[in-house]
Amino acid sequence: MNTEPTLFDLSELINLSDGNMEFVQSMVDLFITQSEENAELIKEHYEKGDLGKVKAIVHSMKPSILIMGIYSLKEDISSIEDYTRRNENNAHLSELIAKMEESLLKVSQQLKEYHVI
């Protein structure tokens, strides 16, 4: 049994879907796919020094992260956006990106184990 705390809260998504659990499940599945792909793309573009693309990807992920109730990433996402907007590539940005990638992978794993329907 997994004793790690749940890193997501689907209550807002369930509310917005008017309780349509098939829709919720499809959104969860889409989030898993997209977050894993985006985490890899962010890492790739960061390593290339392309902070503009990092910023664009992170910005595009923000609404889905919030709707999936991944509140632990809210501040980090905003910080990554701030650093990349100012084109500041530093150790803290690197740490934030690594933390975000790790968190997204953990959330994806938890969501894979969580069955809405």
Image (spheres, rainbow, N blue to C red):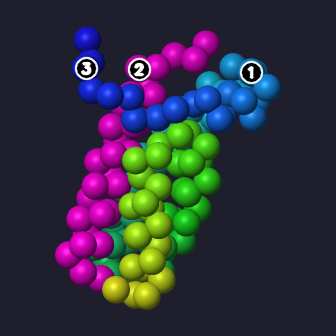
Q: Residue at x 20, y 75 (%)?
A: 91
Left/right of residue 89 with respect to residue 74 in the rendered view: left
Marks 2 and 3, how far apart at CA? 13 Å
Q: Is residue 116 magenta?
A: yes
Q: Is residue 117 visible?
A: yes
- The secondary element bearing badge 3 is classed as loop
Marks 3 and 1, how far apart at CA? 27 Å
* 19 in relation to 36, above or below: above
User: Badge 3 is on which residue?
Assistant: 3
User: Badge 1 is on which residue?
Assistant: 19
Three-letter code for the amino acid on which mark 3 is drawn: Thr
Residue 103: horizontal and vertical position, in percent? 33, 46
- The secondary element bearing badge 1 is classed as loop
Left/right of residue 111 with respect to residue 62 in the rendered view: left
User: Badge 2 is on which residue?
Assistant: 113
Three-letter code for the amino acid on which mark 1 is drawn: Gly
Q: Residue at x 38, y 29 (%)?
A: 6
